[in-house]
Image: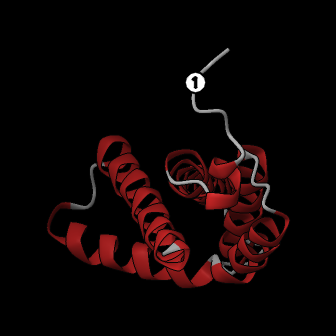
């Protein structure tokens, strides 16, 4: 069951990053128009696969340690975003780097929100008190 939570949270995180990107580009630049679906699908696929080299080791380490603070996932998202943005080369403008970092940081926070805040591992919830004292 935990594996489904992890996978669902990862998909939701990629969707959150994609929605932020599409929303930003639509609101600020207004250039998407008919290409919104294509850009959204590309951003989702690129974010889903591109963040994996950073996200998967972080997810594995936090699951093994049974500790997943929000700043770990947000920081990992920030690093993944910078790595993904660096694919466009050193000659790219600063804006894509910052936008990619913001999208992935939001995705990392979304992963934490679902996998650790809303549906934490059973080992964490088993030790939690049932009533506040």
Indicate whether 71 appears above or below 7.
above
Which residue is drawn at the image coordinates 57% and 45% (left, top)?
A: 117
Which residue is drawn at the image coordinates 47% and 67% (left, top)?
A: 14
Asked if residue 121 can be seen in this view, the reply is no
| Residue 123 sits in quarter | bottom right
Who is closer to the viewer here, 49 or 27?
Answer: 49
Residue 45: image location, x then y, percent: 43, 82
Who is closer to the viewer here, 32 or 4?
Answer: 4
Residue 83: image location, x then y, percent: 74, 73
Asked if residue 39 can be seen in this view, the reply is yes
Indicate whether 16 appears above or below 55.
above
| Colour pattern of the rendering | secondary structure
In the image, farthest residue toward the top: 133
Name the residue beneath numbered marker 1: 131
| Residue 92 sits in quarter | bottom right
The kind of secondary structure element at disc 1 is loop
Which residue is drawn at the image coordinates 26% and 78% (left, top)?
A: 38
Q: Indicate left or right for 102 with 64 as reference.
A: left
Residue 60: image location, x then y, percent: 75, 76
Q: Indicate left or right for 34 with 93 as reference.
A: left
Which residue is drawn at the image coordinates 68% and 39% (left, top)?
A: 128
Indicate whether 24 appears above or below 76.
above
Q: Indicate left or right for 34 with 80 as reference.
A: left
Quadrant location of the C terminus in the rendered image: top right
Q: Residues within 10 Å of mark 1 (few under 14, many from 20)?
A: few
Who is closer to the viewer here, 122 or 101?
Answer: 122
């Amino acid at each position: 069951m935990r594996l489904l939570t992890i996978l669902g949270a990862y998909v939701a995180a990629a969707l959150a990053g994609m929605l932020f990107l599409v929303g930003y580009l639509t609101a600020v630049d207004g250039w998407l128009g008919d290409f919104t679906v294509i850009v959204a699908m590309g951003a989702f696929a690129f974010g889903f696969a591109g963040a994996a080299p950073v996200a998967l080791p972080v997810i594995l380490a936090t699951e093994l340690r049974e500790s997943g603070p929000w700043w770990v996932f947000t920081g990992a998202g920030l690093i993944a975003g910078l790595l993904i943005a660096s694919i466009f080369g050193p000659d790219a403008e600063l804006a894509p780097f910052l936008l990619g970092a913001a999208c992935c940081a939001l995705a990392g926070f979304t992963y934490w929100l679902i996998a650790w805040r809303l549906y934490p591992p059973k080992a964490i919830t088993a030790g939690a008190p049932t009533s506040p004292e």
